[in-house]
Amino acid sequence: MFEIVVHLESDTHGDTGDELRSLRRWLLSIADLRGRVTIREQPPEAGQMGPRLEALVLGLEGATARAAGSFADAVTAWAEAGPRQSCWLAIQALDR
C-alpha cells in the first residue's frame, strides 16, 4: 500500500492537533482526496485526557496521479491560507 504520512511539529514543542485537524478538513474538501485521509493517534500519556493526534495518513493505493498533485497543491494552499502556529511539516512517502 502506498501512503503519504504527514507529521506536524511545533517550534515550541506545543500541541499541533488543532493544526493537523485543520489540514485534514482542508484535504477532505478536495474531491480527489475524500475517503483517503485518516488520523493516526498516540495513546494518552499519564495525565492526558485522551489520545494525542500524531499524524495524518493519506492512502494513495489505486489513486490517480492527479490525487498526489491535488495533495501537494492542497498542502501548499493550506499553509498559505492563514496564520498558523510556528510549526513545520514532515512528509513521508511509504510503500508498504
Image (cartoon, helix red, strand yellow):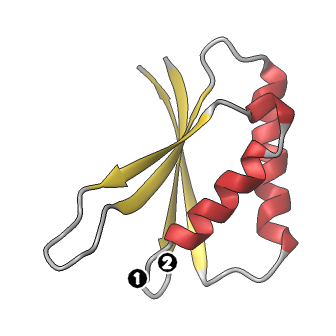
Element type where label 2 sits in the image: strand
Tell me where residue 48 appears, x and y as whole percent.
24, 75
As displayed, is residue 69 above or below residue 7? Answer: above
Taking the spot 48% from the left edge, 70% from the top edge, the residue there is: 9
What amino acid is labelled 2 in the image?
Ser
Tell me where residue 95 appears, x and y as whole percent.
47, 22
Residue wearing tag 1: 13
Residue count near mark 1 (Cα–Cα under 10 Å), binned few <14, some 14–19, many ≥20? few
Taking the spot 84% from the left edge, 25% from the top edge, the residue there is: 66
Residue 75 quadrant: bottom right
Residue count near mark 2 (Cα–Cα under 10 Å), binned few <14, some 14–19, many ≥20? some
Tell me where residue 45 appears, x and y as whole percent.
18, 69
Residue wearing tag 2: 10
The reply to whether dot 2 and dot 1 touch (C-beta < 8 Å) is yes
68 or 21, which is in the foreground? 21
Element type where label 1 sits in the image: loop
11 or 53, which is in the foreground? 53
Check the image and name the residue furthest to the top.
62
Quarter of the picture holding the C terminus: top left
What amino acid is labelled 1 in the image?
His
Check the image and name the residue furthest to the front.
49
As displayed, is residue 80 above or below residue 69? Answer: below
As displayed, is residue 25 above or below residue 68? Answer: below
